[in-house]
Amino acid sequence: MLWLPEGARCEKALLAGKRLHFPLYTAPNMVGRAQTAARRVDDDIAWKEGTLREPVLVTGAAGFIGMHVARRLLVDGRDVVGVDNLNAYYDPRLKAARISELEAFANFRFEKADIADRKAISELFAAHRFPHVVHLAAQAGVRHSLIDPHAYADANLTGFLNVLEGCRHTQCRHLVYASSSSVYGANTRVPFRASDNVDHPLSLYGATKKANELMAHAYAHLFALPATGLRFFTVYGPWGRPDMAMWLFADAIIAGRPIKLFNEGRMRRDFTYIDDAVEAVVRLVPRPPAPDPAWSGEAPDPATSRAPWHVYNIGNSQPVEVSEVVRLIEAAIGKPAARKLWPMQPGDVPETCADVADLERAVGFRPKTPIGEGIGRFIDWFVRFHRK
């Protein structure tokens, strides 16, 4: 596990059959380990004191989680550059409305760009040299990956590679990126632990998110890029996505249409309120992962590494049956739902539940908003938004 500096010299030596020996995660023309550690401590202090003026890049800023993370950073006094392509996966007017919320802040700048556009993303990184990157742009949705798989390859693989390259060439000090609970795939032991093996995805979407974790690890190993992956568990709340269950149920109940309950409503999900997800993200941004000196290649921990790389679960750790979610939405709206029972859909799993002990140890926080409280806030926003 070696960093091979000075590519031309290394290539020449390797072709000559010579063995090269270099220290882990160091290279010429870069600060030493002690200096890097000191810089990260300084960053952490500056972040907490609000004196770090370098902009934070938030990709997917017009998306659900991206908009909330960007707004929280702006409220905290950070300068934020938001990137999004405003595609038509769902109504672009909702995405534009989210950006309008962010543009109320003087310290926000929006760049319309597609992360799959190599030239545009390279130029963006060269112009700003972001010290912190929160990468939330992606093609989301388990079921849609059966319909348009190439969109997932473009956004989640090519797009993520472009972000990694941007971070690598501008000495980004911490990349925080969205993974997903979908990486757990065929796993059935709950709660899901970040240290569990996740080699059996059940959807292309889940496979691309697992690929993101592997790609980030390669860059952490090769280029000492600190990278933290966040496995989000069914995030919901105000400004949510129209393709997700909470929105679909609320919209159908208000309109008097029947709702679809897959697996006859007997699926359990670890619903995580958006404010809790955001709190976890902003606490992790100024805390780049350090190499784990206890990590062993003979008994590898899938959640950590000898490289500066880590993955965390972001979940409420309290799975709720979907039929109970419907009941809570009915109560919040004050109207019963008409139900249509459907079988389990391809790519779906019967239950998700996050073990967040690692997250709590790292940042002193764990998601905890009760599902009834979170649904009440979502319905309040949903009704007001649709009255505009």
Image: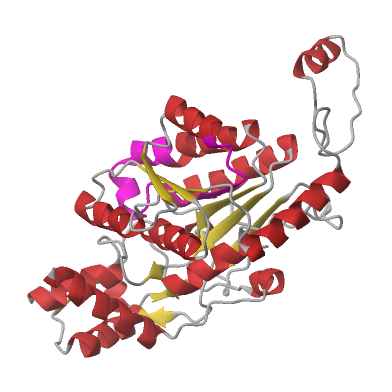
Does the magenta portion include 153?
A: yes
Residue 196 spot, x, y in % from top left: 65, 62
Q: Is residue 305 left or right of residue 150?
A: right
Q: Which of 115 and 170 is in front in this view?
A: 170
Residue drawn at (57%, 74%) of the image: 190
Q: Which of 90 and 209 is in front in this view?
A: 90
Residue drawn at (52%, 65%) of the image: 76
Q: Is residue 138 left or right of residue 1?
A: left
Residue 239 spot, x, y in % from top left: 30, 65
Report which quarter residue 194 is drawn in: bottom right
Report which quarter residue 33 is drawn in: top right
Residue 335 spot, x, y in % from top left: 14, 87
The magenta segment: 128-155
Residue 250 visible? no
Quadrant including the C terminus = bottom left
Quadrant including the N terminus = top right
Residue drawn at (16%, 90%) of the image: 334
Does the magenta portion include 14?
A: no
Residue drawn at (88%, 47%) of the image: 34
Q: Which residue lies furthest to the left in this view?
A: 256
